[in-house]
Each structure stands twice: as C-alpha cells, then as structure tokens.
Image (tube, helix red, strand yellow):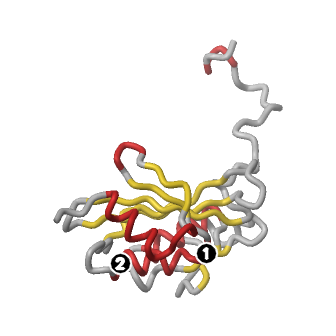
Amino acid sequence: MALTNEIVKNRLTEKFGEQLTGWEEPYGMLTCTMPAGLNKQVLQFLHDDEQLRFRFLTDLTGVHFPDRKGEELSVVYHLHNMMDGIRLRLKTYVPVEKPDVFTVTELYSAANWMERETYDFFGINFVGHPDLRRILNVDEMEHFPMRKEFPLEDPTRTDKDDEMFGRG
C-alpha cells in the first residue's frame, strides 16, 4: 500500500497523540507543529519507522515572529521519504529568551551546516550540536541578522528619492 499523508498523520498521532498540533496540508504537503522539547524524538521516529522512512532532510531553517510572545522563533524542518515520494513539514516554536532546540545531526548529517546557518542568522541554539558556531557571518557579530529587530530602511537617509522606489 502506498504511503499517504493520512497514513503519516495517523502514525504520528498514534505515537505522539495530541502533542502534535496545527495539522494542515498546504499545496498537498502535510504540515504540523511539535513542541520544541520533542523535536528530536519526532524526527527520530519519522526516520526509523519502517513504514514512514523519512530519511532525507531537504531543508531546515528559522523564522522570526516578533509579535508572537513566547514563540518568537521557529525552526521549520522539511523531510522527504524518497521511496514513496512523500514530503512533510514540521514546525516548532521557542521563546527568544531561551531559543533551545535539540540537534538532529545524528539523524541527518546535512543538519550540521543547516543548523549552523540557522544559529548564525537567527540565534537558535541547537543543543548537542557538535560544532555550533557562525558559518557565514563574522565571529565578532553580536546580533542575528535575520531577526526582525531592525527597520528595513534607515528613515534618516536623505540620499534617496521615494519616487524611484514607487512611493511618491
């Protein structure tokens, strides 16, 4: 029997119950939210289960939601079961004051650089990562450039013409 989104959702619900929430299928991709403390367990189950076989980490990134108190930072995982051609998106949220998520480098070797990049740009701490340090920005940088903490433009600039940017 071919693996479907419904089967994946049922297997995850059997294993983790109501800890996984926010189920949806935008553009046919099954998506859910998991607690930050469970990320490694959920991904381990998806990787090891002989029916599910999500053994390819397509992408891992961060997102900053400054208006979501207690859930300002998110880690988004995209997994792929290449045998059955099924993709899955998992999200987890952490507070900006304690942005800790467990590393999944033991499951997916590609997670090593993806987690380093996410740390470098968003400041998400991947607990247990073998070499969590900046990968693209200079080591001396004290902020995380992809966080929405700074205005996109300098309002004091006088050397630009708003009409050139379609605002005039």
Q: Residue furthest right?
A: 156
Quadrant position of the N terminus in the picture: bottom left
Q: Residue furthest left?
A: 1
Q: Nearer the viewer, residue 94 or 159?
A: 94
Point 51% across, 79% down: residue: 40
Q: Is residue 122 left or right of residue 28?
A: right
Quick one: label 1, few (<14), some, or many (20+) residues within 10 Å?
Answer: many
Quadrant position of the C terminus in the picture: top right
On the image, numbered disc 2 is attached to which residue? Answer: 47
- Where in the figure is residue 130, as x and y percent of width and height? 53, 87
On the image, numbered disc 1 is attached to which residue? Answer: 101
Q: Nearer the viewer, residue 119 or 162?
A: 119
Of the image marks 1 and 2, the number of the one nearer the N terminus? 2
Q: How many marks?
A: 2
Which of the 4 quarters of the picture holds residue 124?
bottom right
Which three-letter amino acid code belongs to the residue tagged 1? Val
Point 49% across, 59% down: residue: 32
Q: Which mark is residue 150?
A: none
Q: Nearer the viewer, residue 71 or 105?
A: 71
Q: Is residue 29 left or right of residue 73?
A: left
Which three-letter amino acid code belongs to the residue tagged 2? His
- Where in the figure is residue 79, as x and y percent of width and height? 37, 65
Q: Nearer the viewer, residue 108 or 46?
A: 46
- Where in the figure is residue 147, as x and y percent of width and height? 68, 54
Q: Tell me the SS state at disc 2.
A: helix
Quick one: label 2, few (<14), some, or many (20+) residues within 10 Å?
Answer: many
Point 55% across, 83% down: residue: 129
Gap between marks 1 and 2, in whole Å?
18 Å
Disc 1 + disc 2, Cβ < 8 Å: no
Which mark is nearer the camera, 1 or 2?
Answer: 2
